[in-house]
Amino acid sequence: MVQLELIPTTITEESTTTFINNMKLPIHRWFRFSAGYSAQWVQHEIIKFREELNQPVVIFDPFAGVGTTLLAGDMCGIRSYGVEAQPFLSRITQAKLGWGADIEKFLDFSNSVYRQAKHSNGDTGDYPTLIKKCFPDDTLAILDNLKKAWSKHNDGSVYSELTWLTITSILRVSSPVGTSQMELIQPKKSKKNFMHPLEAYQSQVQLMAQDMEIFQSQTPKSDSNALLYKGDMRNFSEMPKASINLVITSPPYANNFDYADATRFEMSFWGQIDKWSDLHRIRQNLVISCSHHAQAAGVNMQEVLQSKELNPIQEEIIEVCYKLAEERELHGGKKNYHLMVAGYFFDMVKVLSILRKICTKDAKLCFVVGDSAPYGIYVPVDEWLGRLALNVGFTGYYFEKTRDRNVKWRNRKHRVPLHEGRLWIRG
Ligand SMILES: C[S@@+](CC[C@H](N)C(=O)[O-])C[C@H]1O[C@@H](n2cnc3c(N)ncnc32)[C@H](O)[C@@H]1O
């Protein structure tokens, strides 16, 4: 059996802000999420903080993603809370937090689904075009059998949700089409290695059962000690004042990545969305970090830029946003980056203010974040977030770079050097 390493021997500075190593770790590896960071690094920070503080650590992740921070909290045996607004991602995380469930019952449930799927006739009629482009008919028919068998057995239990995740996590594995670095599905690109869906399903069930056993026998508690809230952090009010002493998180970056689109493929398979425009329903609860969201949300740039919440960065953000508004006229796509930048910082102040309330005076906060340069116009995201944090009542900040980005000048729309790292904020 895999031995869990609380503090790994192989953690490198560069890898701490990426998800890649998590694909070797039990439970984390159930769903690949490129926007995530290293679970082992989070564990390392929790342990360090526990030693410094000498009292119980309560950790919070306002942008929980696929639950990396919460599972790291489980590994260290501490209480954790998280918020995630993208409903498909929060469902994945909730299913992962079911690692303490009865393994035999999970196997019974998933095997019943398998048996029924094996003896059914699948249908490929009702799927959105994206799904039809990503699977040959016979593969889609088998996946449809699994989906229908699961729907028949679905009783809302943890076993049902674990099996839902099993099917979700084999979709890309059984598709012959490619996936971009940021996990966006690419129907026009083909890949060599893909699996038969029923084989992929069986092997995923085995992997998940094995991982549950590892976690149950090797973590301090035999069940998760994490609580996930499914909602929008910009108006989160569930936690009492001064109840958190450690925040480890990674907010969306102001870089036009669309978290609603990130699981479009899976949501289309499950019938949750049909076309691209359906994604807007999901974006409404997210921090504005992409241009089409900013436009649909109707960001009023003048009003936002004059708001007192943005005072500490006002002159600079006004300059950047007006430059972006001018620059957009020179580009065919006419992207609304000016609205995106204004909306992003306005949203992030709301989050920082809520964090100020729920964190103790001696709390430590870490934001894994990267800067950006839409249309080549530089936005110093870490620096501005730090200053906005001071303005809502935090006492200090500093930035620790982990890696350079955009320095290879390949396939890039601009040549502005960027970085990624950890913005540390003090309570
Ligand atoms: C960079 S990812 C976090 C990844 C996470 N650290 C992990 O390892 O899985 C940012 C996350 O913030 C979520 N998010 C965006 N806006 C949000 C909001 N208003 N409230 C809560 N979560 C939000 C996104 O859906 C996304 O999952």
Image (spheres, rainbow, N blue to C red):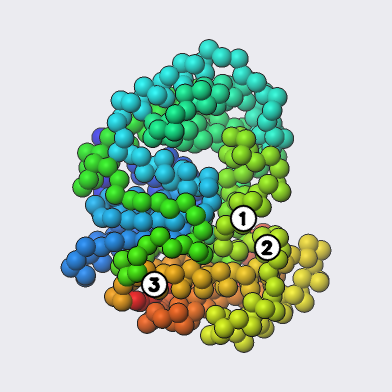
Q: Tell me what residue is drawn at x 21 percent, y 70 percent.
A: 52
**In the image, is 141 to the left or to the right of 359?**
right
* Residue carrying label 1: 283
* Crowding near the residue tagged with mark 3, few <14, some 14–19, many ≥20 C-alpha atoms within 10 Å: some
Res. 421 image quadrant: bottom left
Q: Tell me what residue is drawn at x 74 percent, y 65 percent.
A: 335
Q: CA distance from mark 3 to mark 1?
A: 26 Å
Going by the picture, which residue comes out furthest to the left? Answer: 54
Q: Disc 2 beta carbon < 8 A from ligand 1? A: no
* Residue carrying label 3: 357
> In this rendering, is residue 295 above or below 131?
below
In this orientation, does residue 225 appear?
yes
**In the image, is 366 to the left or to the right of 418?**
left
Q: Which structural element holds mark 1?
A: helix
**In the image, is 198 to the left or to the right of 78?**
right
Type of the residue with mark 2 = Ala
Q: Disc 1 beta carbon < 8 A from ligand 1? A: no
**Cβ atoms at labels 2 and 1 below 8 Å apart:** yes
Could you tell which of marks 3 and 1 lies nearer the N-terminus?
1
In depth, the one of 5 and 35 nearer the eye is: 35
**In the image, is 11 to the left or to the right of 36?**
left
Type of the residue with mark 1 = Arg
Q: CA distance from mark 2 to mark 3?
A: 27 Å
Q: Which structural element holds mark 3?
A: helix
* Residue carrying label 2: 297
